[in-house]
Amino acid sequence: VQTKLPAVGTTIFTVMSGLAAARGAVNLGQGFPDFDCDPRLVHAVTDAMTRGLNQYPPMPGVPVLREAVAAKIRTLHGPHNGRDYDAASEITVTAGATQAIITAILAVVHPGDEVIVLEPCYDSYVPNIELAGGTVVRVPLTPGTLRPDFDKIAAAINTKTRAILINSPHNPSATVWTRDDMLKLQEILAPTDVLLISDEVYEHMVYAPAEHHSVARFPGLAARAFIISSFGKTYHVTGWKVGTVAAPAPLTAEFRKVHQFTVFTVNTPVQYGLAAYMADPKPYLELPAFYQRKRDLFREGLARTRFKLLPSEGSYFQCVDISAVSDLNEAEFCKWLTTEIGVAAIPLSAFYGNGFDQRVVRFCFAKKDETLNLALERLAKL
Ligand code: PMP
Ligand code: GLN
């Protein structure tokens, strides 16, 4: 067959998890928790199953879940001049953020349209744009700080630009956009009709003094945006693959045209279970403290190695510069670290189209303390 995605092989996450399993390494590579979710959440889902909520839900998702999501956005972002979302016409439940992202892209990108991504970026964005027939325009985040360069973003926009994809808190760099960053983007996009896809899956993992400034807080951005979230990240259930997209009604209508003929809808009992569980805001309000403690434990341990720590303001990732530890390139270093030291990590080069190597690798600290301590014990040899 003539491949549609010549540059695509197996994702780095699958490769590194496979290697970690084969070598019995501590897997701090692929981003997922190694601890279980709240048993009350499991109970809420099994309860829905037991009550016979097992047939197709409405195409955009069960109303109670969409209402809970709209209410959460209102509570968290409303007081910041945030946009109000109508549960019926502006919130859609998806099979994880991954499906939300590709569906938004397929819904609005025409062949030949340019779509801006900020590199390094999550690995699904570029193939998604290519599948839609779009042209990928890569704008680098500033090397070193991995913060957005708004002059470069502005310079990349032209009449062919259809959309820009942003992601804060950011995977892989763990940086978080400031309010000022969001305002700058709003100013740049104001005279254009460029659409915005905002991947906010790590919205509840932000460590003070950083704060999550959702696109929902900026009316000039929200009016043109798909805002994407994932329950997998927030509730420690990455395997459930349920997310949401919030977008103004005309954008949601286009989104749902694609959604209804790709997945149609998302499994019913999990949606009811999530809706019931969301009645209590504590689990997501307590998430920053929960992960900040793990981040600090991990950073304290790493500080005793020759790795140079980069800031981790949000997400469950910690990046380190490996220059003082090894001469290997990032990808080779990650393989070596997994096989010889017994700790898996992800090379940042995997998040660049040209494999740009800045001697930085990413660890995931969404792990039990004992897992982090075992990894730190092994890394202490470096
Ligand atoms: N976007 C980013 C930035 C991610 O890190 C992930 C998860 N690795 C996703 C999207 C996909 O989320 P989900 O598992 O809900 O599809
Ligand atoms: N989002 C996770 C990460 O960045 C991995 C998701 C996946 O395996 N596709 O590590």
Image (tube, grey):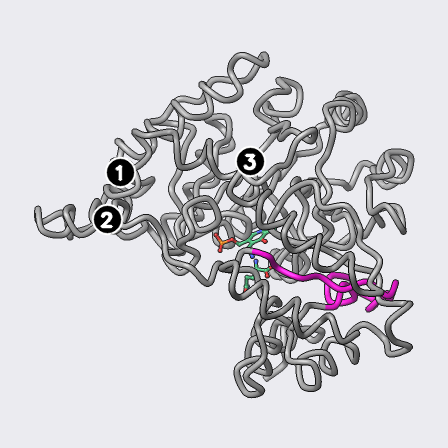
Left/right of residue 65 with respect to residue 380 in the rendered view: left
Q: Are marks 2 and 1 in contact (CB under 8 Å)?
A: yes
Span shown in magenta: 347-365
Q: Are marks 1 and 3 in contact (CB under 8 Å)?
A: no
User: Few, some or many C-alpha atoms within 10 Å of disc 3 (few <14, some 14-19, many ≥20)?
Assistant: many
* Label 1 vs 3, first from the N-terminus: 1
Instruction: Check disc 2 and report its element: helix, strand or loop.
Output: helix
Q: Measured along the vertical axis of the image, is residue 34 above or below residue 289?
A: below
Q: Measured along the vertical axis of the image, is residue 98 above or below residue 204?
A: below
Q: Quadrant of residue 358?
A: bottom right
Amino acid type shown at disc 1 = Val
Q: Which mark is residue 62?
A: 1
Tell me residue 327's x, y (percent): 91, 77
Is 319 a magenta residue? no
Amino acid type shown at disc 3 = Phe
Tell me residue 34's x, y (percent): 46, 63
Tell me residue 114's x, y (percent): 75, 47
Amino acid type shown at disc 2 = Thr
**Real-space CA distance between mark 1 and mark 3, rounded to the nearest whole angstrom:** 19 Å
Q: Which mark is residue 226?
A: 3
Point 54% across, 56% down: residue? 366
Disc 2 target residue: 268
Q: Measured along the vertical axis of the image, is residue 200 above or below residue 330?
A: above
Q: Are marks 2 and 3 in contact (CB under 8 Å)?
A: no
Point 67% across, 74% down: residue? 378
Is 364 a magenta residue? yes
Point 70% across, 47% down: residue? 174
Seen from the viewer's position, the closer of residues 104 and 379 is 379
Q: Which mark is residue 110?
A: none
Left/right of residue 33 with respect to residue 29 in the rendered view: left
Point 51% across, 15% down: residue? 78
Tell me residue 263's x, y (percent): 37, 55
